[in-house]
Image (tube, rainbow, N blue to C red):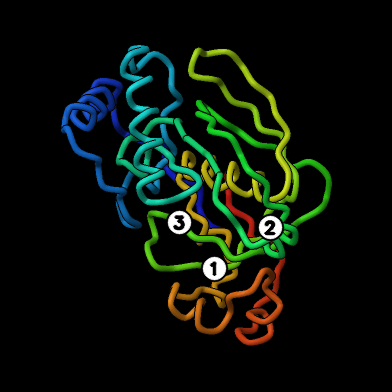
Amino acid sequence: MNPIPPETTASDEQIRETVERILSAGTLPPIVQAGHPALRQRAAALDGQLSSDQLERLIALMRQVMHEAPGVGLAAPQLGIPLQIAVVEDQFDVDPEAAALRKRRPLEFLALLNPGYTPLGTEYASFYEGCLSLNGLQAVVTRPENVLLDFQAPDGSPVQREFAGWQARIVQHETDHLNGVLYVDRAQLRSLSSNAEYAAHWAEPGISKARAGLGFDTGPVSVAGS
């Protein structure tokens, strides 16, 4: 089991300064990569550190960075901001066979503040997963097929919503980021592949070919504190 990630040591003032610096830069910020401390700390709950204008601008910027990457989710720590904010959206055209097997359906844009998820039922699904903060790599991650997500909308109102299939995978991945957890912490590490090797050997809707060729199982990997 992996250790519990430490809480961020950044003060509210430091967080505000970081956000304002990024917002005023006039360019899209880079997505930080594995090894950056913000990715390995539990982010601070959003609780008045930002004005409503700052929050609105940050969410818009995060969406732009996510689209530019491109990706289906982005968490504030991926910009070096230790705050519990994430954005998700999945409107990509996907091969129908892959979409059906992965239960991948379009997901409208959502901003998730202070999210937390609870597995629903006992079904799990195992698929290759990547991350914008671990460029060029993919690995098989086993996750609950269905989750209940509690979060706040940008206006502060509480929201509770069920997610299934690939949408559930997306919101789990982004919520994990806010707790200092990367997908490799939950991955079957024998499945770890560069994007090039994945494309050359294991690209298919499922994982059976990779499982046979690389010799990994598909049981869930536990992470302390999550």
Q: Quadrant of residue 20?
A: top left
In the image, 48 versus 89, the foreground residue is 89
Label 3: element kind: loop
Do the residues bearing badges 1 and 2 touch, measured as CB atoms within 8 Å? Answer: no
Residue type at mark 2? Ala
Rendered image: mark on residue 65 = none
At 17% from the left and 32% from the top, the residue drawn is: 26
Compared to 160, does 222 lie above or below? below
Residue 134 vertical placement versus 158 (above, below) = below
How far across and how far down the image is residue 3, in percent? Answer: 50, 53
Q: Residues within 10 Å of mark 2 (few under 14, many from 20)?
A: some
Residue drawn at 40 percent across, 54 percent down: 132
Q: Inspect this view and state whether residue 159 appears.
A: yes
The amino acid marked with disc number 1 is Ala
Which quadrant holds the C terminus? top right
Q: Circle 2 sits on which residue?
A: 99
Q: Going by the image, does 96 lie left or right of 71?
A: right
Of the residues under marks 1 and 2, which one precedes in the sequence? 2
Which mark's residue is nearer the viewer, 1 or 2? 2
Q: What's the residue at 58%, 46% (across, down)?
A: 170
Q: Nearer the viewer, residue 66 or 20?
A: 66
Residue 226 shows up from this direction: no
| Badge 2 element | helix
> In the rendered view, would you say 121 is above or below 108?
below
Q: Quadrant of residue 159?
A: top right
Q: Which mark is residue 131?
A: 3
82 or 2, nearer to the observer: 82
Marks 1 and 3, how far apart in space? 10 Å
